[in-house]
Image (cartoon, rainbow, N blue to C red):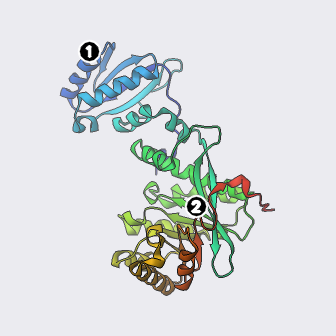
């Protein structure tokens, strides 16, 4: 299986030639006319239109014009490639959809963050409610202190639109593992998010994750991988194969942001995760809401049935912590116990 989805695509050539391929002759002619009307010297070779550009700004302007000129169906048929003016290369090796290249060109700083792994992690404590001690940490992707600023959810949204989601998700997992190695001692769990939609074949796509854990000297038993799209599960069999791949390596798995209701409880019974994380929307002011209390009770009952540990997210008040404890929730996380801090500031030696 090809792993091109996870390979870095490299930097944009500051000047060079762009190529657009389409199987539709009429669109080919329209492309030629459009580029010529904007002052580009156009070359047409079979199904490919090519033109030189002098800087990234002109390339951005051109792609904006193409997006205005052609409808979605036409744009969907376009595949693009860039060739540097300074380095000889074969432009036909890497063709990507127009929409992917458009997003990468439109957001060059976010593209650079993903390509060059210009991010770090913050860590938020997870507390064992009965013992009132740290059970683990969740590792969260954040900008570098002196790097490009970004909101994590916007970075992942851009990555999805640009066809870079698998690359970003894999790098984020590896960064979390590496950063946790010297910050967290053995026996303390490290909760790490992952997107199931970024994993096409578990054995191939997760190989670098497993290798990173081994090279960092992190005990597989201390790793907990969280599904962050629990409410959007489209292929439960595929997700089950991913969770199994983690568990076969001795790692644990968690379902994140769980709500309640028949569908959620059915998913729990089907997937049988090691941990269940209750959505902060249910936890917030649960001490004042009987319906939320009933939801928590339901989730705890099903989790107990399948042998999973329950974690309540987003706890900001003592009353919420007390209510979670009352219904048998074992673990808790939220600002009441501690905000995320740079992982290196945990100041804990793992050796």
Placement of 344 over or under 272, stated as above or below? above
x, y percentage for residue 56?
45, 23
Is residue 212 visible in the rendered structure shown here? no
x, y percentage for residue 143?
59, 44
Q: At x 54% / y 52%, what residue is drawn?
A: 170
Q: Is residue 157 left or right of residue 124?
A: left
**Mark sitting on residue 267:** none
Query: Which residue is disc 2 drawn over?
Result: 192
Query: Which residue is disc 1 drawn over?
Result: 37
x, y percentage for residue 274?
54, 76
Is residue 188 visible in the rendered structure shown here? yes
List the single residue furthest toward the left.
26
Q: At x 66% / y 59%, what residue is drawn?
A: 213
Q: CA distance from mark 1 to mark 2?
A: 50 Å
Q: Is residue 275 left or right of residue 64?
A: right
**Nearer to me, 302 or 273:** 302
> Which quarter of the image is occupied by the C terminus?
bottom right
> What kind of element bears circle 2?
strand
Placement of 160 over or under 249, stated as above or below? above
x, y percentage for residue 37?
26, 15
């Amino acid at each position: 299986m090809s792993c091109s989805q996870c390979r870095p695509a490299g930097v944009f050539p500051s000047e060079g030639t762009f190529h657009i391929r389409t199987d539709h002759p009429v669109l080919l002619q329209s492309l030629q006319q459009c580029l010529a009307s904007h002052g580009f010297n156009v070359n047409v070779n079979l199904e490919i239109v090519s033109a030189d550009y002098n800087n990234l700004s002109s390339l951005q302007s051109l792609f904006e014009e193409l997006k205005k000129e052609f409808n979605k169906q036409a744009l969907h048929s376009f595949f693009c490639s860039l060739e540097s003016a300074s380095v000889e290369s074969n432009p036909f090796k890497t063709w990507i959809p127009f929409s992917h290249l458009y997003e990468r060109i439109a957001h060059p700083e976010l593209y650079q963050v993903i390509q060059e792994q210009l991010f770090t992690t913050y860590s938020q404590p997870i507390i064992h409610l009965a013992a009132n001690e740290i059970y683990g940490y969740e590792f969260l992707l954040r900008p570098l202190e002196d790097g490009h600023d970004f909101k994590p959810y916007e970075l992942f949204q851009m990555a999805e639109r640009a066809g870079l989601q698998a690359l970003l998700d894999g790098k984020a997992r590896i960064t979390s593992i590496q950063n946790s190695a010297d910050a967290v001692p053995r026996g303390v769990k490290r909760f790490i998010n992952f997107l199931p939609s970024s994993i096409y074949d578990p054995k191939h796509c997760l190989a670098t994750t497993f290798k990173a854990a081994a090279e960092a000297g992190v005990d597989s038993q201390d790793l907990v991988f969280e599904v962050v799209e629990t409410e959007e599960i489209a292929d439960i069999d595929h997700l089950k194969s991913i969770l199994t791949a983690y568990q076969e390596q001795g790692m644990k798995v968690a379902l994140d942001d769980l709500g309640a209701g028949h569908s959620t409880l059915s998913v729990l019974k089907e997937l049988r995760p090691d941990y269940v994380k209750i959505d902060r929307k249910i936890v917030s002011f649960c001490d004042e809401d009987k319906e939320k209390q009933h939801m928590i009770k339901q989730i705890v009952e099903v989790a107990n049935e399948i042998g999973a540990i329950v974690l309540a997210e987003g706890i900001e008040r003592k009353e919420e912590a007390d209510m979670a404890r009352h219904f048998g929730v074992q673990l808790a996380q939220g600002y009441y116990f501690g905000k995320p801090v740079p992982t290196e500031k945990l100041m804990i030696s793992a050796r």
